[in-house]
Image (cartoon, helix red, strand yellow):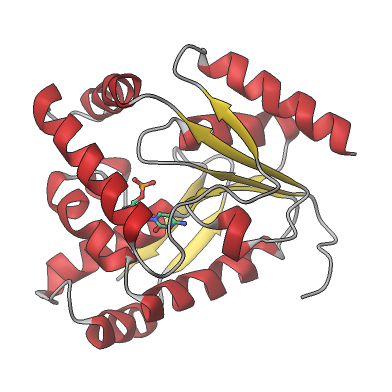
Amino acid sequence: MSLPSHLQIAIDGPAASGKTTVAHLLAQRLKVLYLDTGAMYRTLAYMALQTGTDADNEGALVRLWEQASVRIVLDEMAPLGFRIVAGGDELDEMTLQSKHVTAIVSTIAAHPRVREAMVQSQRHIALEGPVVMAGRDIGTVVLPLAHVKIFLTASVGARVERRATQLRAAGIDVSLHQLAREIEERDRLDRERPFSPLVAAPDAHVIDSSEMTVNAVVAEIATIVERSR
Ligand code: DC
């Protein structure tokens, strides 16, 4: 793999650690492109639900992704910071964050051939220009030569509060207890899967954001980026 010619910033971390909010704001501040790769796995989960494809059927999921020719357009004007068009429809946050999608997305993301297809698209997208990419394996697998790698963590309590606020803002009703259970279960699945498990890259800056505001986290990362140049 050759050295990236554009600035690449990888932001990884567990569910609801605030990485997508932070990554989006950072991209706006630095005036670079932004992609939340979790949305790609969520898109496939949504398509599996729509077509009745079994979340355990790796081959069928890969075919579904390839045949649907999902379009991902990095667009700072879009509400998410990018647009995902599948089957002619642009998917919104409410669809991507729905309970049904969330319930199966970790199972779908554990399949190695699904991950291969996603990683290939993500590397291709990274060629478009300077980018902040958020996910679980960006610094370890997708962009291993990224100029700056951040591993963003937070306590389960802080993450539950944040996810609840985010879901309520998207009009989705939640129980905090249920949310804590779901987040812990997704952490377990993401950390324990044999292929590209959630882990900090050895050269990542680890930031615990439990007691930090979003703006403070963005400012800290912006400083790290500045120093790396
Ligand atoms: O960040 P999120 O909650 O939207 O991620 C949804 C799921 O996708 C989560 O279970 C982990 C998985 N994921 C992944 O395995 N690798 C990525 N780069 C991004 C997300």
Instruction: Give the quadrant of the C terminus.
Output: top right
Instruction: Give the quadrant of the N terminus.
Output: bottom right
Residue 15 location, x and y as percent?
Answer: 35, 40
- In the figure, 84 relative to 34: above or below? below
Q: Image check: 22 left or right of 224?
A: left
Q: Quadrant of residue 59?
A: bottom left
Q: Give the residue drawn at x 75%, y 51%.
A: 130
Q: Give the residue drawn at x 47%, y 77%.
A: 116
Residue toward you, 98 or 192: 192
Q: Image check: 26 left or right of 88?
A: right
Q: Image check: 82 left or right of 142?
A: left
Q: Quadrant of residue 2?
A: bottom right
Residue 96 location, x and y as percent?
Answer: 28, 49
- In the figure, 58 relative to 184: above or below? below
- In the figure, 16 relative to 60: above or below? above
Residue toward you, 227 or 206: 206
- In the figure, 36 relative to 18: above or below? below
Q: Is residue 11 visible to the viewer in this orientation of the structure?
A: yes
Residue 167 location, x and y as percent?
Answer: 24, 29
Q: Give the residue drawn at x 38%, y 62%.
A: 85
Q: Is residue 175 visible to the viewer in this orientation of the structure?
A: no
